[in-house]
Image (tube, rainbow, N blue to C red):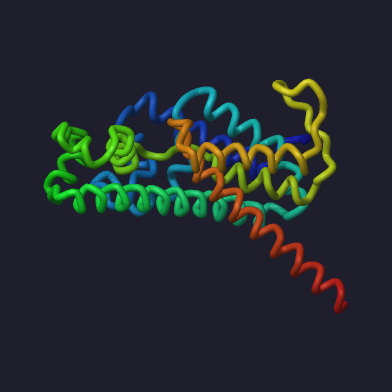
Amino acid sequence: MGRISETIKSLIIANVIFFAGTYFVGEVVFRLFSLYYFESPNFYVWQPLTHMFMHGGLMHILFNMYALWAFGSPVEYHLGSKRFLFFYFTAGLGAAFIHTGFNYYQVHTISEQILQAGWSSDDIHRILTTGEYDTNLLKSVTRDQLNTLFSSYNVPAVGASGAVYGVLVAFGVLYPNAELMLIFLPVPVKAKYFIPGLILIDIFFGISGTSTGVAHWAHIGGALIGYLMIRNWQRNQFERNRWN
């Protein structure tokens, strides 16, 4: 943590501009740039990129931008500006694709269960587009499954969290013994303990589905892609140094 770089400052400004746009322009901006399920009529090809600049509320953007500055600054110092930008956007895109892949699994698994119970594709289409269904359908699937089917198809993902999780993991790999002073923790915690713990929480909620309103698989995706990239770069650097 230190003086903000031009790279991180530009990312924060871009996020603030998009956030302001959702208030001054309204629903049009949100619908155009948030990440919708790829089979939805609201999906556009630029959304895996632009959703990183959209946020659902003031606390959402404040936490993400604070984490970007706090953890991104030392990571950028280590990687350099150009490589950091590549890392940031690749982690964010990876988060989008893994989140979308999980939604695809949910939509098609539940849809197949409905079809096997003797219902038609028109019944599924009605659920996806309106959220309405024949109550007899509850003999074959649960209400929670139907809600999941509707939300996976219609509720967009927003936020820089996937990219930020990639940055968090990179920080943990590069500075594992850095002690983090956090508002909600009474004592300092080393990065090598705190960051894996944070990811394990996301994995738990992602698998159990007990926490709604958070794109846990996007967090996991960003963390996974970030880990693979930073480890690969470290290994390549080690190989170059060994043979020099």
Relative height, residue 165 to residue 179 (above, below) = below
Q: Position of residue 111 (x, y in %)?
A: 25, 49
Quadrant housing residue 141: top left
Q: Nearer the viewer, residue 198 or 141?
A: 141
**Left or right of 240 in this view: 67:** left
Quadrant for the C terminus, please: bottom right
Quadrant housing residue 79: bottom right
Q: Position of residue 145 (x, y in %)?
A: 32, 38
Q: Nearer the viewer, residue 81 or 170?
A: 170
Q: Residue at x 47, y 52 (%)?
A: 98
Q: Position of residue 200 (x, y in %)?
A: 63, 41
Q: Residue at x 39, y 24 (%)?
A: 23
**Left or right of 76 in this view: 242:** right
Instruction: Point out the residue furthest to the front here.
Output: 139
> How many marks overall?
0
**Left or right of 239 in this view: 154:** left
Quadrant for the N terminus, please: top right
Q: Position of residue 4 (x, y in %)?
A: 71, 36
Instruction: Point out the residue furthest to the bottom here.
Output: 243
Q: Residue at x 66, y 52 (%)?
A: 84
